[in-house]
Image (cartoon, grey):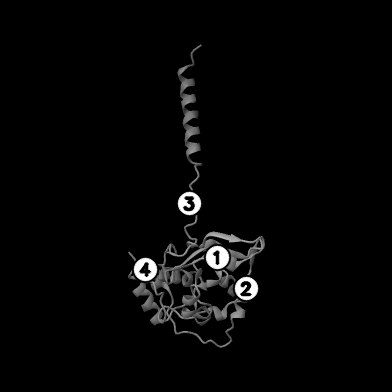
């Protein structure tokens, strides 16, 4: 038996109502991670993304007092699991063909120091450098932090803050900012400045005017 004309009209109306109701309930997705800071863990990537715009957003202020400063107030190197501490993790991350004992003592590998373009196979020839030195952080805001905040900063494996570099370059740098020390390797200046800005931005640390000028000069080498 064929449906009557009135029956067809009711059926069509029901179908349209169902379609319209379904369309109103569609989910709208957002872009994930847009507000999260990103950075590469490997030296030389330049993935910190700190450019001139980020540099301009930093607070410019005179360097603070070193009164009360002590490296012990920035607890490091802390345990990172599996018997490894932060230094061990950086050596494993930044090296190639790295070998370690069951207790995570690094015994061999190949490392490239990006600051001075030197290669080594001896882990004892390396220091783990803080991109923004502990004392430099103290002078630019870390003096007001809690001990836990300073410990996080000193062991940060997420931001571009820790690098395996030659003993000579790390000790020549000391606690200086880019206004008084730059990596001997000019090819690393772009990445160095980007990473410095990334760390200072994330931790809301200030820069001096001389430091800002030096960073702008280094960022100008980016291609």
Q: Nearer the viewer, mark 1 or mark 2?
A: 1
Q: First in sequence: mark 1 or mark 2?
A: 1
The residue at which mark 2 appears reads as 148
Please say if 26 is above or below 81.
above
**Rendered location of residue 156, percent (x, y):** 55, 68
**Rendered location of residue 90, percent (x, y):** 55, 65
Disc 2 crowd, CA 10 A, few/some/many (<14, 14-19, 20+)? few
Q: CA distance from mark 4 to mark 3?
A: 38 Å
**Rendered location of residue 130, percent (x, y):** 51, 73
Q: Nearer the viewer, mark 4 or mark 3?
A: 4
**Secondary element type, mark 2:** helix
The residue at which mark 4 appears reads as 187
Instruction: Locate the C terminus and report the quarter of the image it occupies.
Output: bottom left
Q: Are marks 3 and 1 in contact (CB under 8 Å)?
A: no
The residue at which mark 3 appears reads as 30
Q: First in sequence: mark 1 or mark 4?
A: 1
Q: Nearer the viewer, mark 2 or mark 3?
A: 2
């Amino acid at each position: 038996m064929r449906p009557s004309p009135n029956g067809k009209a009711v059926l069509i109306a029901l179908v349209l109502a169902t379609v319209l109701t379904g369309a109103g309930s569609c989910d709208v997705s957002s872009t994930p991670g847009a507000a999260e800071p990103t950075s590469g863990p490997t030296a030389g990537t330049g993935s910190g993304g700190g450019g001139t715009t980020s540099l301009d957003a930093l607070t410019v202020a005179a360097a603070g007092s070193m009164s009360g400063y002590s490296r012990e107030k920035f607890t490091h190197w802390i345990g990172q699991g599996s018997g490894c501490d932060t230094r061990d993790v950086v050596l494993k991350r930044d090296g190639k063909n790295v070998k370690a004992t069951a207790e995570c003592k690094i015994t061999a590998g190949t490392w490239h120091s990006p600051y001075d373009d030197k290669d080594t196979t001896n882990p004892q020839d390396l220091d783990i450098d803080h991109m923004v030195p502990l004392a430099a952080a103290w002078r630019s805001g870390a003096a007001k932090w809690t001990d836990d905040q300073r410990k996080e900063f000193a062991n940060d494996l997420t931001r571009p803050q820790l690098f395996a570099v030659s003993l000579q370059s790390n000790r020549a740098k000391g606690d200086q900012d880019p206004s008084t020390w730059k990596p001997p390797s000019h090819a690393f200046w772009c990445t160095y400045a980007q990473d410095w800005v990334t760390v200072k931005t994330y931790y809301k640390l200030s820069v001096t005017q001389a430091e800002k000028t030096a960073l702008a000069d280094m960022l100008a080498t980016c291609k």
